[in-house]
Image (spheres, rainbow, N blue to C red):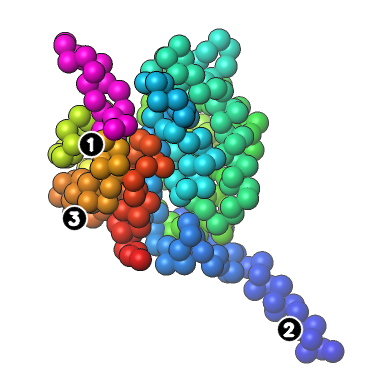
């Protein structure tokens, strides 16, 4: 009887004992799978490649919806294996919406509604690490506009707040540590989060201080690479990196032209060879490492997930 009680107590302590790593409370019991692969549990977030959906809210099955960038909705994107959701925000009346350039061109609905859908997926998939990159072109208040939406949708408890203002690529915890801590969603804003002086919103991270991008709205199918958008204090080889692997067609080649997502070329654009070649073009800027985020239009077309799996070292 004594041995049984002692064994039960030991098991309880083993399951509840925690340690602190990079600001996370990490239970001793570890996840078996992380983003679908046991091998990723011990891999740092900064050394992992994630499949991304460009303007993830702008989904339509109508081929004449020229402002669309996706054919399947955000839930289907996540089910497919997308683990970076990118979106562009704009105020529409009194509510924050995700819209493509303007809400008159493509209105994806409220940010609140969008996040409720994403939260539903996360609740059903507890072993997934997700990244959100949202644009904030109107420089809306982080504490007055953005935080209440995250609080209301139940996201706040999932959001990872780094232990230091700027995280270098090798500073991030492993996926397993993030999952076990419950802080498994990383969110970047392109504007408005540069000064992390409010503890309540320190989970909203400044994108270009930690993530650089190559040229956006690319029209060259060969995808040459250069560091296009970044900010200090880190050098590009210390930051996370994002490749904009979403080809555009110029349908009015006069002046600045009119660019639309190139759906006809998407099977080739989203093919393995094209993505791997783009990654190789950017490798010299990150000490020959792979990009952290591969941002695609029409994620349901081509072989984007297989290409990302190869970048993570998995072949089937």
Q: Residue at x 23, y 18 (%)?
A: 251
Residue closer to the observer: 66 or 12: 66
Number of residues whose C-alpha sits closer than 10 Å to that of mark 2, classed few (under 14), some (14–19) or many (20 or more): few
State whether residue 282 is above or below residue 94. below
Residue closer to the observer: 170 or 243: 243
Task: Find residue 7 and name its label.
Answer: 2
Whether residues under marks 2 and 3 lie with C-beta atoms below 8 angstroms apart, the answer is: no
Give the x, y percent position of residue 44.
Answer: 39, 58
State whether residue 12 is above or below residue 63. below
| Cα distance in 3D space between marks 2 and 3 | 49 Å
Task: Find residue 288 and name its label.
Answer: 3
List the single residue furthest toward the right. 1
| Cα distance in 3D space between marks 2 and 1 | 55 Å
Q: Residue at x 43, y 56 (%)?
A: 173
Q: Earlier in the sequence, mark 2 or mark 3?
A: 2
Q: Return the residue at label 1.
A: 214
Q: Is residue 258 magenta?
A: yes
Q: Is residue 236 left or right of residue 80?
A: left
Whether residues under marks 3 and 1 lie with C-beta atoms below 8 angstroms apart, the answer is: no
């Amino acid at each position: 009887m004594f041995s049984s009680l002692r064994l039960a107590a030991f098991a309880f302590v083993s399951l509840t004992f925690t340690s602190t790593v990079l600001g996370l409370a990490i239970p001793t019991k570890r996840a078996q799978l992380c983003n679908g692969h046991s091998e990723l549990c011990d891999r740092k977030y900064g050394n992992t490649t994630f499949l991304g959906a460009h303007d993830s809210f702008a989904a339509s099955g109508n081929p004449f919806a020229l402002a669309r960038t996706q054919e399947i909705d955000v839930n289907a994107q996540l089910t497919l294996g997308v683990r970076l959701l990118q979106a562009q925000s704009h105020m529409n009346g009194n509510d924050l919406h995700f819209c493509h350039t303007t809400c008159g061109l493509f209105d994806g609905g409220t940010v609140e509604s969008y996040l409720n859908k994403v939260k539903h997926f996360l609740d059903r998939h507890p072993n997934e690490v997700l990244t959100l990159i949202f644009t904030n072109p109107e420089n809306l208040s982080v504490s007055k506009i953005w935080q209440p939406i995250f609080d209301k949708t139940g996201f706040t408890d999932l959001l990872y707040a780094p232990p230091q203002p700027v995280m270098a690529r090798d500073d991030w915890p492993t996926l397993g540590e993030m999952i076990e801590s419950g802080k498994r969603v990383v969110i970047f804003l392109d504007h408005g989060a540069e000064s992390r002086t409010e503890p309540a919103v320190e989970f909203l991270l400044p994108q270009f201080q930690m993530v650089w991008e190559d040229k956006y709205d690319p029209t060259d199918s060969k995808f040459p690479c250069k560091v296009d958008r970044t900010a200090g204090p880190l050098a590009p080889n210390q930051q996370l990196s994002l490749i904009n692997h979403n080809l555009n067609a110029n349908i009015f080649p006069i002046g600045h032209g009119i660019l639309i997502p190139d759906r006809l070329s998407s099977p080739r654009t989203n093919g393995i060879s094209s993505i791997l070649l783009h990654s190789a073009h950017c490798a010299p800027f990150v000490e020959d490492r792979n990009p952290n985020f591969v941002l695609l239009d029409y994620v349901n077309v081509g072989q984007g997930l297989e290409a990302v799996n190869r970048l993570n070292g998995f072949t089937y």
